Image: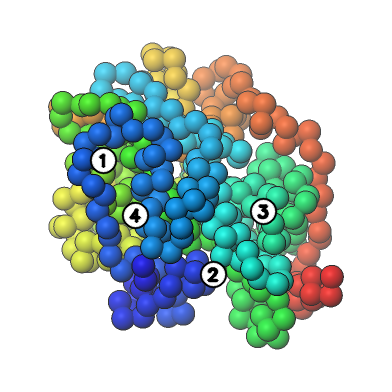
Amino acid sequence: MLYHSTNNPGLKFSLKEAVFKGLAPDKGLFMPERFVPLDQEFIKNLPSCSVEEIAYQVSNAFFGDDIGKNELMSITLNAVNFPLPLVHIHDNIYTLELFHGPTLAFKDVGARFMARMLEYFTRDFDREIHVLVATSGDTGSAVANGFLGVSGIKVHILYPKGMVSSIQEKQFTTLDRNISALEVEGTFDDCQKLVKEAFNDKSINNRITLTSANSINLARLLPQSIYYFIAVKELGKVPGEISMCVPSGNFGNLTAGLIGKRIGLPVQKFVAATNINDVVPEYLETGKYRPRPSLQTIANAMDVGDPSNFTRILELYGKSCEKISEDLEAYSYRDEQLKSAIRTVSGEYGYLMDPHGAAGYLGIRDYLDRHPSSTGIFFETAHPAKFADIVEEITGQAVEIPSRLQEFFSGTKNTIPMTRVYKDFKAYLEGLINN
Ligand SMILES: *Cc1c(COP(=O)(O)O)cnc(C)c1O
């Protein structure tokens, strides 16, 4: 399978190139050149298939040309080696809990898949490869834990000192082994700039193999389709149509669902739920895309003012707002609405949501109000314990902290101090070469 740039369908790359580059040389995003639909019989029989079989078949539709069966099976099953339960909330509303991975958020699936795919592609490299990641929180922890212990790969996380929550910081500064955390005297933008400069620095790239693990990377994006099919399986046979709502920031998770539909996912309508960063809901209403600086909310992993995957959605639907609207609706919610949803769903139905899941709940509820015969699933993208402060304030009750989150708290923080000056970061990279 070849992959092209969203800026130029004629510019094509192999899977390996697309995964290593992350972004096309013309700054476009990579897209598969075609979609291979899954067998109709397979889709009909989803409820009786095993999770393993579904995960492999979906993965195979994307990567089967490039990676042999046994290896792809192993990469795939490693990425979804934790439960993905569907939980009934009330009436025709269900949630798919995507937070049972090591860092308690859905990004674990894509990050774990990418780690093993890179390991596969570099298995006969004679030198180590170095993954550089700038993070404001969640991406760093998912990538660090996804790559933990993966052979031949070293990960370097750059994060702004004092600007990530303590639990997020613990999730990528206590791991050691092949994971280093650089505590940068600066902002997230400074961290991103250092990483960009390193990628553009020929004298470094000639001597050391660098790659990124951004959420725009295909190896993180596409495997996320898997759990959409698992949600359908868990629902079992339903008489009517299925709708799915995804709490969205950069719209990678949602894009994976739309791509899933291309290969046969039996979902009639997708709903994107955002916080007040509502460029996509506004686009669907007005046909105009107006990116702008992001605003801070309690669902902060969705504080995005110019969603990176929007160009992929445009390409999927021939840049037609009308076509997109056939598959997608989008709603935005204020913090007060998210808080009120957490309170109500906890009080009336005994289910505790995090602020991102709360947006998903409101989105599917608003959709089902107008389509009562549909069965709705929203994604719960993070465990409420990751946002314990907010959730406890709303419900007045202590959130139980899962043991794997507690383990991070007991770890010892180990970081490398870094300035925001490239010369210093370059010296750090040169130190890696001499080792
Ligand atoms: C990253 C994230 C999102 C947004 O996902 P996108 O793929 O960027 O749309 C939603 N919820 C949580 C908890 C996240 O960490």
Residue type, label 2 = Phe
User: Callout 2: few (<14), some (14-19), or many (20+) C-alpha neighbours within 10 Å?
Assistant: many
Q: Which residue is mark 4?
A: 61
- Identified at 48% across, 48% down, the residue is 73
Snapshot quadrant of residue 266: top left
Q: Residue 419, position in %: x, y? A: 77, 67
Q: Which residue is mark 2?
A: 20
Residue type, label 1 = Phe
Q: Nearer the viewer, mark 3 or mark 2?
A: 3
Q: Earlier in the sequence, mark 3 or mark 4?
A: 4
User: Which of the image's four quarters has the N terminus?
Assistant: bottom left
Q: Which residue is mark 1?
A: 42
Q: CA distance from mark 1 to mark 3?
A: 33 Å
Residue 150 numbered mark, or none:
3
User: Can residue 318 be seen by looking at this rendering?
Assistant: yes
Visual colour scheme: rainbow
